[in-house]
Image (cartoon, rainbow, N blue to C red):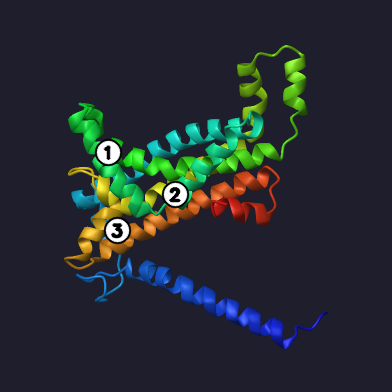
Amino acid sequence: MKRLSLTDISLKVWAIIVFIFLFSPIAIIIIYSFNEGRLLVAWNEFGFGSFATIATKPAITDAVLVSIQTGFIAALIATALGTMAGVALARHAGKWAPWFLILLILVTVTPEIVDAVSLLPWMVFLGQDVGLSIFDDGIVRLVVGHSLFATAVVAYIVRSRLIGIDESLEEAAADLYAPPLKRFTQITLPLVMPAVLAGGLLAFTLSLDNTIVSAFVQVSGTTPWPVYVLSAVRSGLRPEIASVSTIMLLLTLGALALVAYVLRRAGDSPTDIAKTVGGG
């Protein structure tokens, strides 16, 4: 058995310290979600009352439902647009491809506050000046704002998956006179389906914690959960904030675990899975 050197032991200890530092706040929130006290920071006794409050307090219930509804719709749109973009970049790249990649990069590196500030007047212009009343709807605004970054992420994932797959099956189908749509639905789409599912799940999780864009584009009556938490800070955080945060954390972890499972079944290595889950 190989003996660890002092350097190896020091690095392992340091890694453990870093992980404890990073995840201690999350652990504390989970613990305080079982607090029966009036305020989050004032521990009273252990109980499940804060979780029951989620169902009895309409403001919290509505905020959670808005976040889930927005995340689901935004994930569908981002998956559809991102899949088409990824397939086009991987299989039909032309002179336009580098410019399109630059646009995708701009979407991913642009600060969220810039997107939020630009989206608000644009949607007001479309809704009030142009007369497209659909852009006065809060859910529509949130879906559009949440879909921007998620679409780019899905496009990256699908493109990287297709680039690593040989085109021989698609070429053989073309030689057998299979029409383009049939080639796509029966060959290309099944090959890239793990990436599509992973991208859709990531798009959903990205939407759940989208705070800055949501704070700018949301309208009264469609307040998502992150914005509700921000407004609750002014009057003091209550234990139900921690309980909902715990549920949202479990939901996010479940989605990420499903991403890892899908990619693992598709043959990805742990390193590739980590890059995908990280949005890389």
Q: Nearer the viewer, residue 159 or 27?
A: 159
Q: Of callouts 3 and 1, which one flags the residue occurring earlier in the amino acid sequence? A: 3
Q: Secondary structure at mark 2?
A: helix
Q: Secondary structure at mark 1?
A: helix
Left or right, 11 with reference to 55: right
Q: Of callouts 2 and 1, which one flags the residue occurring earlier in the amino acid sequence? A: 1
Q: Secondary structure at mark 3?
A: helix
Examine the rendering and report whether any part of residue 197 can be seen. Answer: no
Residue 113 drawn at (x, y percent): 33, 54
Q: Residue sitting at 35 percent across and 42 percent down?
A: 145
Residue 4 drawn at (x, y percent): 75, 83
Q: Nearer the viewer, residue 231 or 32?
A: 231
In the picture of the structure, the residue carrying the numbered disc 1 is 122
Residue 124 appears in which quarter of the rendering?
top left
Q: Residue sitting at 41 percent across and 42 percent down?
A: 148
Q: How many marks overall? A: 3
Location of the N terminus (image quadrant): bottom right
Q: Residue furthest bottom?
A: 6
In the picture of the structure, the residue carrying the numbered disc 3 is 51
Residue 82 drawn at (x, y percent): 51, 36
In the picture of the structure, the residue carrying the numbered disc 2 is 205
The disc labelled 2 sits on which kind of residue? Thr
The disc labelled 3 sits on which kind of residue? Phe
Q: Nearer the viewer, residue 159 or 49?
A: 159
The disc labelled 1 sits on which kind of residue? Trp
Examine the rendering and report whether any part of residue 98 can be seen. Answer: yes
Q: Residue sitting at 64 percent across and 17 percent down?
A: 180
What's the CA distance linking mark 2 and mark 3? 22 Å
Left or right, 231 with reference to 20: left
